Image (cartoon, rainbow, N blue to C red):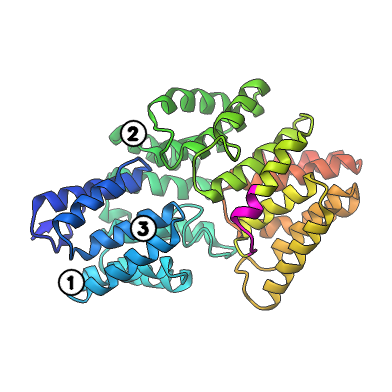
Amino acid sequence: MFKDRYGLELSVGSAAARDDYVAAVDCIFAATVGAEEHLGRAIQAEPEFALGHAALARAHFILARVSEARASAARARELAARATAREQGHVNAISLAIEGKPVDALAATREHITRFPRDAMVLNPATGVFGLIGFSGRQEREPEHYEILRNVAPAYGEDWWFDMAFAFAACEVGRLDEARKLIERSMAANPANGHGAHIKAHVLYECGEPGAGLDYLKSWMPGYKREALMHCHLSWHIALFALGLGRTEEAWQAYRSAVHPGGSWGPALNVATDSVSFLWRAELAGQPRDAALWREALDYTRQQFPKTGIAFVDVHAAFACVANGDSEGLGKLAEELRTRVSANRLPAGSVVPQLAEGLGAYGAGQWERAAELLRKALPETVRIGGSRAQRDLVVKTLAAAYLKAGRSAEAQALLAQRVA
């Protein structure tokens, strides 16, 4: 029986199918182009390869092709009945997330990696700030993310994917020296790793090195295909680094060419949130409001996410409503969020409508009220998901509310605390 890159047996009868599967998994882990092509060949060679269908389901799901993902997951489940116990657990854990059962998926993942810690394809969906833990809505999700990886670290040695995933977890809990060491080792082992370049950008951001971050991404990005998964989001990082350095023309060029709806290629979640985030930060940095770009961002978000329920998107939608002066839309959004909270259908809880209310006060020029609402919500903002760098949008808005309310000392203290 053939084995994958982590030494786990695969129910395939040909080296070619195994090789294509391993290459596809690496494409998924590195956010590079080619996973679906590799898996297509693997499945053509081995039509009853359950893990091949599960990996294809995951590849579709990452790109928000939900119907295709669920079809592939269903086929994987059907075939897994004749596979090994390890492969059955593998298919189950991956499929649960695709079937819209993230709580069950995380529980199955924890159980599975206790028995098979090197089953990286099962562990992968639980990692990152948009993963099963990152979007769990739990207050302690960041230390949980770090711990689940720390517990299995001895099983991986110096594997480039694991080093990358562990680096991000370490970065988000403030272990920056550890994060830098891990991501440098990961990128040395696989320099073409798109997720790794992204995590290195986060480490440099958290270390307060925007110049180094911008230089790094500008030197790394030319070799990364525009249609690759992280191109849009890495371009957002370039725009943010440039904006923070006062290089506004460069920031806008990155936004218009590769971040805004219509100019970017990427998953809708990234396009919707990154476009709103950049436009709001640009205004906080003193740039004039561009009504057309804000309208475009709000229209795109509503088209792609007509219903509430993904807290990270919902908060960015609230920012977009405020910037567009759409108080009616913001009120409707907040009401839908409160209804979800009452029905226990919003994992992040009441902090989401609280943030929407605070942003509404900010948009209405009620600086004192906005400051107090945002201040109260800030400690639980971690529950909405996303990285610390992304959630700085709330920190910076609260600082702006403090300044507009004449509370400059509190603004300075808030920003100093974040830097520390």
Say if mark 2 contacts mark 1, CB within 8 Å: no
The front one of 251 and 155 is 251
Looking at the image, which residue is at 15% across and 61% down? Answer: 9
Q: Earlier in the sequence, mark 2 or mark 1?
A: 1
- Residue 330: image location, x then y, percent: 78, 57
Q: Earlier in the sequence, mark 2 or mark 3?
A: 3
Please determine whether, in this image, residue 147 is positioned above or below residue 297: below
- Local crowd at mark 3 within 10 Å, few (<14), some, or many (≥20)? many
Looking at the image, which residue is at 42% across and 27% down? Answer: 220
The quadrant where residue 89 appears: bottom left
The front one of 303 and 351 is 303
**Which type of secondary structure does the marked residue at label 3 adopt?**
helix
- Residue 283: image location, x then y, percent: 76, 34
- Residue 260: image location, x then y, percent: 60, 37
Give the side of residue 214 with respect to residue 324, left or right: left
Task: Identify residue type, mark 1.
Answer: Ala
For the N terminus, the quadrant is bottom left
Give the side of residue 221 with respect to residue 357, left or right: left
Q: State the mark number for residue 83.
A: 1
The front one of 234 and 143 is 234
Range of magenta residues: 300-308
Q: State the mark number for residue 58.
A: 3
Give the side of residue 162 with respect to residue 126, left or right: left
Q: What residue does disc 2 label?
A: 192
Q: Is residue 78 visible?
A: yes
Task: Identify residue type, mark 2.
Answer: Ala
